[in-house]
């Protein structure tokens, strides 16, 4: 008996459409390893159609007074809230995430973030006017950039899509967003909800468009970068390709490309509390988080006690099916990611020690055990490269300067944390750590009002906050004669 697969479709100019050439790809539920839907494998014609729709809708959306864009975003937030259970069910099937955690940890911040940017829509202002040359007054206009091509990742398909479309729409831009080929379902549902709000308010449907497909769709011979502003999330190699293509005609690009967050634990730390928080921040979402607490640097004087406690916490952490209320996280997103995580553990050097986990869980789906690895050196592969799985590594340091050297000694620079009771030390470390975020005695909380984004190979540009909002605008100087 064959189960009929759900049919997902692109959303272009207010219509759900198949790919122009009819191609599709199967979408797999990572909790079962079985396909549950098909999605368009879009090509150049589909990208061109979506870009044309967004371009046509841009003038009317741009010229709305900010309060009208705010009204639309607030209605979108309300609609998301009203259909929360449908979003949760879709995302759980999309990703294998626990239903309860998705309800508690993703839906509330998503809705809050949309409402935050709805408020930001009415703060699209320049600096005050002034006379900087006799007889002439200067003013600053802050304007939307135009059509934004956005590529969202598979680790947080709903939330990352919100981080992209909400500030873009608030600033007066139109959007073409491409979800990952492994997690398109929730973004397609977004299109239904957002399209309904736009229609109800009488706005052009081309304001928000969704294109499904794979990496080739995302590049589509550079067609997506006909947009005036590009956003690419998560994948380093893909981000470099996008930036390289954009440079040919000087398109602006916002890249958030991953991380390798150091977690610096000093000898005066409350070890039980630190272990509890760090294990959650490392294993949450199966470690598939660019800011995950995956790289612990612990002072040599407390190493053994800390590692023992962390290994115990890992052994007590559960992974399992989405409807199991006792699990912290679900499966890895896809078979390739399971192979990547497994490969890192299989290639560990002889001096490394697996303190907990280090193996697949079950033979159905893509589950991997909470894993702790100690005895590692700074130049080990697993220290330098992003695993993106439920794996926490542990190194030791002898003093503050060595901790700083080890922490900064990777190519990524997205997030970090410091664990100490010494305020002065915490301040010194927050200055010295070369990362876009430094948490002190905590790790992973995010708020809409504060920026998220990194340095070095973690990319550039900010999500969330007024800084993220400004990334979707351009600045124009207007000078007028007083004569």
Image: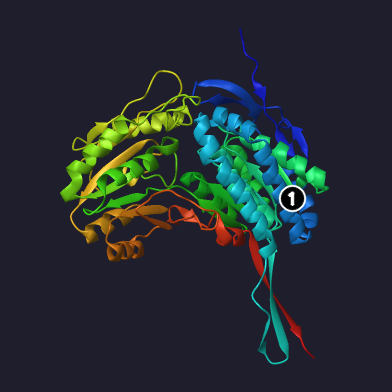
User: From this viewpoint, is residue 44 visible?
Assistant: no
Rendered image quadrant of residue 449:
bottom right
In the orientation shown, which residue stands out farthest toward the right? 202
Circle 1 residues within 10 Å: few <14, some 14–19, many ≥20: many
Residue occupying the point 32% across, 50% down? 263
In the shown orientation, is residue 190 left or right of residue 293? right
Q: Nearer the viewer, residue 241 or 39?
A: 39
Tag 1, which secondary structure? helix
Report which residue position mark 1 lands on.
Answer: 72
* 261, above or below 340, in the image: below
Residue occupying the point 29% across, 66% down? 424
Q: Position of residue 242 (x, y in %)?
A: 55, 49
In the shown orientation, is residue 210 left or right of residue 391? right
Q: Nearer the viewer, residue 285 or 343?
A: 285
Q: Position of residue 371 (x, y in %)?
A: 31, 33
Residue occupying the point 56% across, 61% down? 467
In the shown orientation, is residue 389 left or right of residue 375? right
Position of the N terminus by quadrant: top right
* 269, above or below 184, in the image: below
Q: Nearer the viewer, residue 350 or 368?
A: 368
Position of the C terminus by quadrant: bottom right
């Amino acid at each position: 008996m064959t189960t009929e697969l759900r049919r997902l479709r692109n959303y272009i100019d207010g219509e759900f459409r198949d790919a122009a050439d009819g191609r599709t790809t199967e979408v797999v539920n990572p909790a079962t390893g079985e396909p549950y839907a098909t999605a368009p494998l879009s090509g150049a014609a589909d990208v061109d159609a979506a870009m044309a729709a967004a371009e046509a809708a841009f003038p009317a959306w741009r010229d709305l007074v900010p309060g009208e864009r705010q009204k639309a975003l607030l209605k979108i937030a309300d609609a998301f809230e009203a259909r929360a259970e449908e979003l949760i069910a879709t995302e759980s099937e999309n990703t294998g995430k626990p239903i309860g955690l998705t309800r508690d940890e993703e839906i509330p911040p998503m809705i809050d973030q949309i409402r935050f940017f709805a408020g930001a829509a009415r703060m699209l202002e320049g600096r005050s006017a002034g006379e900087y040359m006799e007889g002439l007054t200067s003013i600053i206009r802050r304007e939307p950039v135009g059509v934004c091509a956005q590529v969202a990742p598979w680790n947080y398909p709903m939330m990352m899509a919100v981080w992209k479309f909400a500030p873009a729409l608030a600033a007066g831009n139109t959007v073409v967003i491409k979800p990952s080929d492994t997690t398109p379902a929730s973004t397609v549902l977004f299109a239904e909800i957002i399209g309904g709000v736009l229609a109800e308010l009488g706005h052009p449907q081309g304001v928000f468009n969704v294109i499904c497909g794979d990496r080739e769709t995302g590049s589509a011979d550079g067609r997506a970068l006909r947009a005036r502003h590009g956003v690419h999330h998560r994948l380093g190699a893909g981000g470099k390709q996008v930036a390289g293509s954009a440079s040919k005609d000087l398109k602006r690009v916002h890249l958030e490309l991953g991380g390798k967050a150091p977690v610096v634990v000093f000898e005066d730390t409350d070890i039980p509390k630190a272990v509890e928080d760090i294990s959650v921040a490392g294993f949450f979402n199966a470690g598939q988080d660019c800011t995950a607490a995956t790289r612990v640097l612990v002072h040599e004087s407390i190493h053994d006690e800390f590692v023992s406690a962390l290994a115990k916490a890992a052994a007590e952490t559960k992974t399992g099916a989405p409807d199991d209320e006792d699990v912290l996280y679900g499966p890895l997103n896809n078979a390739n990611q399971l192979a990547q995580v497994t490969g890192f553990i299989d290639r560990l050097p002889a001096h490394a020690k697996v303190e907990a986990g280090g193996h697949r869980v079950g033979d159905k789906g893509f589950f991997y055990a909470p894993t702790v690895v100690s005895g590692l050196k700074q130049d080990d592969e697993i220290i330098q490269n992003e695993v993106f799985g439920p794996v926490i590594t542990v190194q030791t340091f002898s003093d503050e300067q060595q901790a700083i050297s080890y922490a900064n000694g990777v190519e990524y620079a997205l997030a970090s944390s410091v664990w100490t009771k010494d305020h002065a030390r915490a301040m010194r470390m927050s200055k010295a750590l070369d990362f876009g975020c430094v948490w002190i005695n905590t790790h992973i909380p995010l708020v809409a009002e504060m920026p998220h984004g990194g340095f070095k190979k973690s990319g550039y540009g900010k999500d969330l906050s007024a800084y993220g909002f400004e990334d979707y605008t351009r600045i124009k100087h207007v000078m007028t004669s007083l004569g």
